[in-house]
Amino acid sequence: MPAFEHSYPETPRHVALIMDGNGRWAHQRSLPRSAGHKQGVEAVRRAVRAGLDLGIEYLTIFSFSAENWSRPPSEVNYLLGLLRRFVRQDVAELHQAGVRVRIIGEREGLQRDIVRMLEECEQLTLHNTAMTLVVAFNYGGRDEIAAAARAIARKAVSGDLAVADIDAAIIGAHLYAPDIPAPDLLIRTSGEQRISNFLLWQLAYTEFVFVPEHWPDFNREILERAIQEYSGRDRRFGGLTAQAL
Ligand code: IPE
Ligand code: IPE
Ligand code: MG
């Protein structure tokens, strides 16, 4: 077996997507921003199908950030409506395809019907194993770390945890979905090269690929190109590569 076997094209186990550019996609077509969001849902469907075909184990999508509440109420309401419709129309199909759905993000303060809907979706698909679709909704990386800090502080105050034992593993164990491995590959569409408060903790050693296409145009080919680029990267995790050993 060649020593550099690891650098052959390989499928990342976990791909995270920052779905950006819906508004710009619509603007380029003289359409309202809502039209971009609507087409964005089609792109989510394509991404899930491609993820299943390619054997990706975890696909995480950034659907609504903790900061997105600062958009005009009409846009926020439209996005919430799309989420409701997506759950109503797509979850049965996802379930049939063997997709497990998990939601990460702050549930505190969300409308009760939305929380119930998200919980039902997780319950229904709980035992599916073909792929896990992680939907980041009302998600902020700093909020996630702050929530973990609160939970850890409570345990320290009650005496269940010694302060000296708080390390990276303990913090990781208190995040929204502690059992899910960190993303191998993060793709952000629309050319913006920033994290926008997504998965701050988990992205420590993730490979980033930024693509110029707007999210509503996302498809299998774009995903495959990003995976191709990923497979040529030399992941080191602070150590040395196999070739250098
Ligand atoms: C991504 O597209 C969707 C969400 C953030 C909910 P945008 O709405 O951010 O589109 P741009 O960035 O304004 O083009
Ligand atoms: C990140 O996109 C959030 C989602 C994709 C849901 P934004 O469009 O909100 O990010 P910024 O504001 O350009 O950094
Ligand atoms: Mg944007």
Image: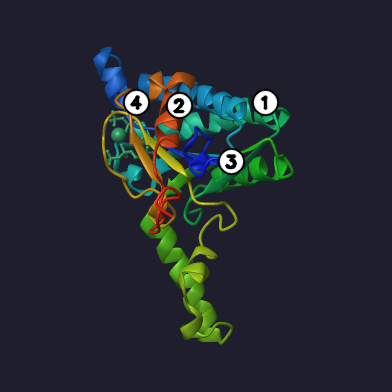
Judged from the image, the secondary structure of the residue bearing numbered disc 1 is helix
User: Mark 2 falls on what kind of element?
Assistant: helix
> Considering the numbered disc 3 on the image, is that residue within a helix, a strand or a loop?
loop
**Residue that mark 4 sits on:** 22
Q: CA distance from mark 3 to mark 1?
A: 41 Å
Q: Quadrant of residue 230?
A: top left
The amino acid at mark 4 is Asn
**Amino acid type assigned to the residue bearing label 1 in the image:** Glu
Tell me the tag on residue 223: 2
Q: Earlier in the sequence, mark 4 or mark 3?
A: 3
Residue 156, above or below 192: below
Q: Residue at x 56, y 29 (%)?
A: 51
Query: Gap in Å between the C-alphas at discs 3 and 2?
Result: 29 Å
Question: x, y percentage for residue 217?
Answer: 39, 19
Residue 186 at x, y percent in the picture: 41, 40
Mark 3 or 1 closer to N-term? 3
Foreground mark, 3 or 2?
Answer: 3
Above or below: residue 159 compared with residue 129: below
Q: Is mark 4 within 8 Å of ligand 1?
A: yes
Q: Are marks 4 and 2 in contact (CB under 8 Å)?
A: no
